[in-house]
Image (cartoon, grey):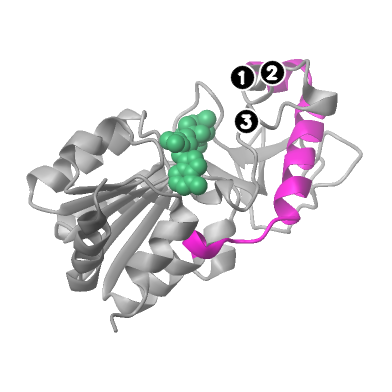
Amino acid sequence: MTDGDLEKAAGLVRRARRVLVITGAGVSAESGIPTFRDAQQGLWANFDPQQLASPEGFARDPALVWQWYADRLATIEQTEPNAGHRALAALEQRVPDFLLLTQNVDGLHQRAGSRNVHEIHGSIRRVRCAETGRVYAEGEVPIVPPFPVRTPEGRLARPDVVWFGELIHMPAHRAVEDFLRAAMPDLLLLVGTTALFPYIQQWAWQAASHGSAVIEINPEPSVLAEICDVVLEMRAGKALPELVSEPV
Ligand code: APR
C-alpha cells in the first residue's frame, strides 16, 4: 500500500453516485464482536461452533444452541457501532443509490444509522419458528430462558440466522441481484471480509468486469484483492472515516 492509495480511494468514493458495499466480520472487529472462533472461550471452550451453528446440532440439543446464541447476543448488546459503521451510514446519506450487503448478524450497521441493509446470513436478534418457518419481528419473541425459546404459539423457535449447510437468506441475495441488474454501481466497497463465499466473489467479479471501481479495506487482503483498483491494508474503523469525510 502506498501513500497515494488512500487519496485515490477517497477520489473514487467522492465521485461515486451508485455504491454497493459488502461487509464481513472485520467491520465489527473494532466494536469487540468476537468471531465464531474467538467466541469459544470459557464455558464454550469445549464446543465446536460448527456443531452449535448447524441444523444437526440444533436437532441434537436445542436448549444448548439457544444458550450459546443468547450468550452471543448478550455480548453483542454490550457493544456499540464503531467509526467504520458510522462512516458507511454517512456515505449512504450522501449518495443517491446505496445498498449494503452484510454477512454479519449483529445489527450494528442498522444501529449506526444505515438504512438499506441486507443481511445475507440473517440476524441474531430475530427469531423464527423451527416448524413453520414464520419469521417474527425483532423483539416480538424475547430471547430469554427457559431455553429453548418457543414462539407465542408454543412451537420450537430458532435463531433467524443461516447455519452451516443451510441456504443463504434469499431476499438479501435477490436485493443485490436486483441492484446490479438495474445498473452497475460506480463503486464496490469490500470491507472486512475474507470473501470466501462464491456469491460474494461472483458479485465482485461482475461489478469489476462491468467497470465498477472496486476498493478493498482489510489489513489482510482477501482473494479479491487482485481485481481491486485500490486495496487499503487498514482497519475499517480508520480507513472508512478517512474515505468518507467531506472534502476540504
Ligand atoms: N478492519 C477490516 N477488516 C478486518 C479487521 C478490521 N479492523 N479485522 C479483521 N479484518 C478482516 C480479516 O482480515 C478477515 O479478512 O476481516 C475478515 C474477517 O474474516 P471472517 O471472520 O472469515 O469473516 P467473513 O468474511 O465475514 O466470514 C463470512 O463466515 O464464519 C462465517 O458466518 C460467518 O458471516 C461469517 C462468514
The residue lying furthest to the right in this view is 146
- Which amino acid is tagged 2? Gly
Q: Is residue 223 found inside the magenta-colored segment of the image?
A: no
Q: Say if residue 24 shows up in the picture.
A: no
Is residue 247 shown left or right of residue 73?
left
Q: Is residue 64 found inside the magenta-colored segment of the image?
A: yes
> In which image quadrant can residue 112 be found?
bottom right
Dominant SS type (magenta): helix
| Residue bounds of the magenta highlight | 56-85
Q: Nearer the viewer, mark 3 or mark 2?
A: 3
- The percent position of residue 149, horizontal first and vertical second, equals 81, 39
CA gap, disc 3 and disc 1: 9 Å
Q: Nearer the viewer, mark 3 or mark 1?
A: 3
84 in relation to 227, above or below: below
Residue assigned mark 3 = 36
Q: At 73% across and 55% down in the image, what residue appears?
A: 77
- Which amino acid is tagged 3? Phe
CA gap, disc 3 and disc 2: 15 Å
Residue assigned mark 2 = 57
